[in-house]
Amino acid sequence: MRALLLAVALLALPTRPWLERDGAAVVLSADVGPLFDGDLRTRLQSGLSTTLRLKLELRELDDGAVIGFGWRVARVRWDLWDERLAAVIDDPQGVREQTWPSIDAFVQSFAAIDRVPVAGSVPVDERVVQAVLRLEVNPVSADKLARMRRWLSAPEGAVGDPFGSGVLGSFVRLFDNLKPGIAERVLSVSGQPVRADRLPFVVRGVRPGGG
Amino acid sequence: MGRLETKLLVLLVLLIAVPISVAFMRSQTLFDRSLAVGLNPGVTEALDDAVEVFGAYVRSEKARQEALARGIAEGRPLADRAAAGPDAVRDLLRGHARAPRVQRIALVGGPGVADVTVESPTFGDPARWRVRTLELPLTGVPGYAALRYTFGLEAAFLDRFEAMEAEVIAPRAALETYREELAADFALRFLLPLFGAVLVAGIISVVVGRRITLRLKTLRHAMEQVAAGDLEVRVAPTGRDEVADLARGFNDMTRRLRESRTRIEHLTRVSAFQGIARRLAHEIKNPLTPILLAVQQIHRSYKGDDARYRRTLDSAHEIVVDEVATLERLVTNFSRFAKLPTAERVDEDLAAFARDIVAAHPEIEGLSAETPDRPAVAAVDKGLLRQALTNLVKNAGEALRDVERAPRVTLRVEPTADAVRLVVEDNGPGVPRDARERIFEPYVTGKDDGTGLGLAIVKKIVLDHDGSIAVTDSAHGGARFEIVLPRHVEGEPG
């Protein structure tokens, strides 16, 4: 039993963002599952569609400047009748549709950040960097905001439906607004500040933070 | 920027900004309240409840159907009927398949046993339903391994939830999320046109104000010139507004002032000449009789027989008598000029008056009257006007004495809205252009035997009637004297 727990611990991702060097690149690992609190899980299970935008930021501690960036977006909807979660996932790998049999299964998949590149190269010097993960629930889409503005200012009938048609929308790229914006909820977690020249190197076969 | 321009600017900006600002504040309040009504926590709670109730209903319906399926699978009747054979099983399942929202119930046969499937007679078109199938293993049911229970929920019901989300919940959530942005955006979209309108109003007021003030400055400058004595100044009346009316009024005023000044100057001059004429008449007339008597005395008292001296004496007597007669005539004219009476004006029909004058002078060859059929009434001193018109027609007749063509002198009366025009024109030699102003001055004459007082008297009479006189070329080829007399005496009601 003790061996099993040890194995699970070695396989598990760190709950706080963990930075490593993979060659010249900086990669980030984390399990943001704990950010999915009861309210968020209730929301996901309500049958309403929800957009989740996960921003992975590498910041300089001094001035907060973002020097590296990664992202993952999902538009999800729990099917109350079929009892499965349908999602459109959008990340640097592309846009794809997936289903999960439960909310937990989806969260486990979506929240696992496993050595995701956030910067192509960061100078190896004494600067102190920090990983910040922001999970935005139903964030503002620049397009939707623009449509709402047009709707607000234009006379009736001059513009189309400001809120878009279709709950999941079309399967176009979802991530259309990289700027920090407004969202129904914003949940975040930060990693430990670390000097760039002291970032650990990736060791294949060993889980991030496991050593 | 002038004070008027500043006032116009402030006024226009206020006129634009105040109502729009009030409308803005009202609409902002309305906007905020509308949002507050739509986004109040009660509505949020109700919508959350609706979502929750919907989910609960779907879950409970599934649970109910599952309970029904379990009831069939685990119930004693199924085991009993299974033992009795497939028909008995079918009968039992048929009864259960009549339950609402059940599509199909099937028993999966064990080895060597055929499946028994019963379709619901009331389920209808499968496209109207979202269906689920439960497969429950059977224990204690001889010959059968499992129960397949297929049931559904109306697709329209589930679609309604999606529609509610798309039409109500998602827009509302978006509004709630963007609330502050939208409020700011709304304000901006209202304020931008406001600033635009204020800017346009400002530009318009500056442009319009500058145009008006420029024209007013021009008028003020012209007034200063008038005050300095320059009555020739004129202002171009551009546009059709009140400032243009003011400019036209100003020009009219300076024209009247010019005419008035000319009249006063002429009357002053004539008055001065009247004084001179009176004195000359007095000074000349007094010694004429003693001179004439003395000469006659000398002429009569010579009794000698010197024929040569007698001839000289007769000649001198004749010359003195003739010259004294000329001087007496001159003195008579001077006296008449000096004693011109003040005009006593009463309303007269000048058409009839003109006809009378023409009738009274048959000796003037070619004289005729052109008068309207209706009366042309004006306030005149008949005696003085008769003197003036007689003078003019006589002058015309005299001018035609040496003309070879048939003489033509016309006295025409032309009534207008507020004046009567009297025209005397002939086909004589006319008046040279450079002499037209001077001929009305006293002692200026073009005739060898003239005193130069006739036209001066005419002009004085006309001016005493508040009228005007001018000489131009006649359509007949000669001179055209035009007198314009107002219909009514100035200062009296018309």
Image (tube, coloured by chain):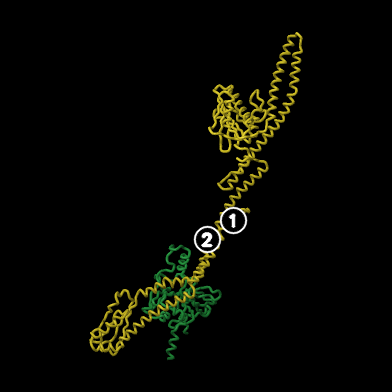
Chain colours: A green, B yellow
State which quarter of the image contains the N terminus of chain B: bottom right
State which quarter of the image contains the C terminus of chain B: top right
Residue at (44% x, 85% y) in the render? A10
Q: Position of residue A128 (x, y in %)?
A: 54, 77
Q: Position of residue B440 (x, y in %)?
A: 64, 30
- Closer to the camera, A21 or B454? B454
Q: Is residue B473 left or right of residue A121?
A: right
Q: Position of residue A206 (x, y in %)?
A: 44, 83
Mark 2 secondary-structure assignment = helix
Location of mark 1 (residue): B9
Q: Is residue A121 left or right of residue B450?
A: left
Is B4 located above or below residue A138 in the figure?
A: above
Q: Within 10 Å of the Cα at label 2, are there few (<14), some (14-19), or many (20+) other Cα atoms?
A: few
> Which amino acid type corresponds to the residue marked 1 in the rendered image?
Leu
> Which amino acid type corresponds to the residue marked 2 in the rendered image?
Pro
Q: Is residue B171 left or right of residue B447?
A: left
Location of mark 2 (residue): B193
Q: Is residue B202 left or right of residue B319?
A: left
Is B245 located above or below residue B438 in the figure?
A: below
Residue at (50% x, 77% y) in the render? A132
**Can the viewer see residue B384 in this picture?**
yes
Return the chain for callout 1. B
Q: Earlier in the sequence, mark 1 or mark 2?
A: 1
